[in-house]
């Protein structure tokens, strides 16, 4: 049983639809995400994360700004990215923005660093894709030095060197909680252990057999490095409705539209109903009634041992009101059921 479990929500800021079925403007989607976070805070959800993307189907390109707006309207929920694309950003500016968010949110900020599942930010900010690995490795190395809050001396190939440099503002509590987001690479799991940072597994939820090898690898690496045990999180898409049939019926059209749009870019065949059902039954989708989703999360938590479960609650052009209802059910019914199952 997990000695400490956090239950969170996150969104990529998917462009959703209005009551008339038409896609909403990006500005309205951002305002809706803020309202969704306010609801999550009221319901007792532990964490709310927003992704960073630079493409038409996702509205949020500046997570820290959205999180700052949420911070001003909430009191207890922890706030973070899901994820920050460190490879195409400057580690110093990322640290400064999140340290500032942490001050505004009275210590509730954290950051999940990753390489992202899309590459639009590389040409947008002038980075070459053939430096994909080097950019992340060097920038993570610098960021790890920054969160120590000591003077930093650092040298690499991707940005100017630093000599006895301090970065402001400092984080009030002494350090900024920093996770490494991993999409399935064993090398990335070992890298997180090497820096002694918590691990967030992206879209590898569902049957514990899908992610347990990564958990075991992480624990072995921490042990070999004589590093204290760190939290592990699992992030997966999901949707909650009153019944299993209702949840699947409501999610299927929007999920297929999102999956086929991205799949066309990556050479995947269109998603069929059978594939969707298999993902919901045995794969990464946590879709169903509160009882069904709670059972899957409880099984995930037991396999994790300790950490966080994050439900990605938006996928494609689902209406805002249905997302709000899903969040309501997650906070008011799923979370208590999970905790009862783990008691």
Image (spheres, rainbow, N blue to C red):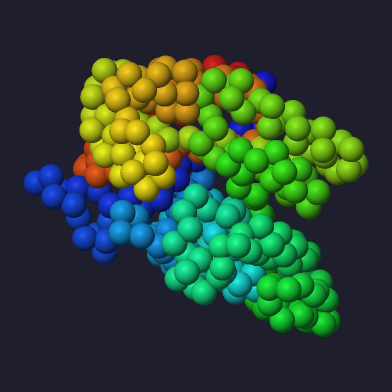
Q: Is residue 332 above or below residue 273?
A: below
Near-viewer residue (125 or 236): 125
How many labels, in total?
Answer: 0
Please state the horizontal and vertical placement of residue 81, each as a whole percent of the image: 52, 55
Q: Quadrant of residue 342?
A: top right
Please state the horizontal and vertical placement of residue 194, each as a whole percent of the image: 81, 49
Left or right placement of residue 152 versus residue 226 in this view: left
Q: Is residue 153 above or below residue 98?
A: below
Near-viewer residue (279 or 227): 279
Q: What residue lies at 23% left-to-right and 33% top-to-bottom? A: 253
Please state the horizontal and vertical placement of residue 50, each as a whole percent of the image: 45, 53
Please state the horizontal and vertical placement of residue 220, each as a whole percent of the image: 82, 33
Near-viewer residue (323 or 43): 323
Near-viewer residue (273 or 223): 273
Residue 108 appears anywhere in the view: no
Q: Quadrant of residue 289?
A: top left
Q: Is residue 72 above or below residue 163?
A: above
Q: What residue lies at 40% left-to-right and 19% top-to-bottom? A: 278
Q: What residue lies at 61% left-to-right and 33% top-to-bottom? A: 5
Residue 51 appears anywhere in the view: yes
Q: What residue lies at 54% left-to-right and 40% top-to-bottom? A: 202
Which quadrant is home to the N terminus? top right
Q: Is residue 101 above or below residue 337?
A: below
Residue lying furthest left: 20
Which quadrant is home to the C terminus? top right
């Amino acid at each position: 049983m997990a000695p400490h479990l956090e239950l969170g929500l996150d969104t990529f800021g998917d462009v959703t639809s209005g009551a008339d079925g038409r896609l909403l403007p990006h500005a309205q989607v951002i305002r809706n995400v803020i309202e969704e976070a306010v609801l999550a805070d009221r319901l007792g959800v532990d964490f709310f994360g927003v992704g960073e993307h630079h493409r038409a189907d996702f509205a949020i390109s500046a997570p820290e700004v959205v999180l700052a707006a949420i911070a001003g309207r909430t009191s207890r929920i922890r706030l973070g990215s899901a994820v920050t694309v460190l490879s195409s950003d400057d580690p110093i500016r990322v640290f400064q923005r999140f340290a500032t968010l942490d001050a505004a949110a009275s210590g509730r900020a954290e950051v999940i660093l990753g390489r992202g599942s899309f590459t639009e930010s590389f040409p947008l900010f002038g980075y070459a894709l053939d430096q994909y690995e080097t950019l992340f490795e060097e920038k993570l190395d610098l960021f790890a030095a920054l969160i120590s809050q000591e003077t930093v001396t650092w040298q690499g190939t991707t940005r100017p060197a630093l000599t006895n440099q301090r970065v402001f503002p400092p984080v009030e509590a002494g350090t900024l909680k920093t996770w490494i987001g991993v999409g399935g690479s064993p090398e990335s799991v070992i890298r997180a252990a090497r820096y002694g940072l918590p691990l967030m597994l992206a879209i590898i939820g569902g049957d514990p057999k899908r992610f347990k090898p990564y958990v075991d690898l992480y624990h072995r690496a921490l042990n070999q490095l004589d590093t204290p045990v760190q939290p592990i999180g699992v992030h997966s898409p999901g949707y909650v409705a009153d019944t299993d049939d209702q949840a699947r019926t409501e999610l299927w059209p929007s999920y297929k539209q999102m999956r086929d749009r991205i799949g066309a870019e990556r050479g995947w065949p269109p998603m069929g109903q059978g594939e969707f059902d298999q993902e919901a039954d045995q794969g990464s989708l946590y879709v169903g009634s509160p009882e069904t989703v709670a059972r899957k999360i409880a099984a995930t938590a037991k396999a994790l041992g300790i950490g966080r479960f994050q439900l990605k609650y938006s996928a494609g052009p689902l209406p805002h009101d249905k997302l709000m209802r899903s969040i309501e059910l997650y906070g008011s019914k799923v979370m208590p059921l999970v905790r009862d199952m783990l008691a």
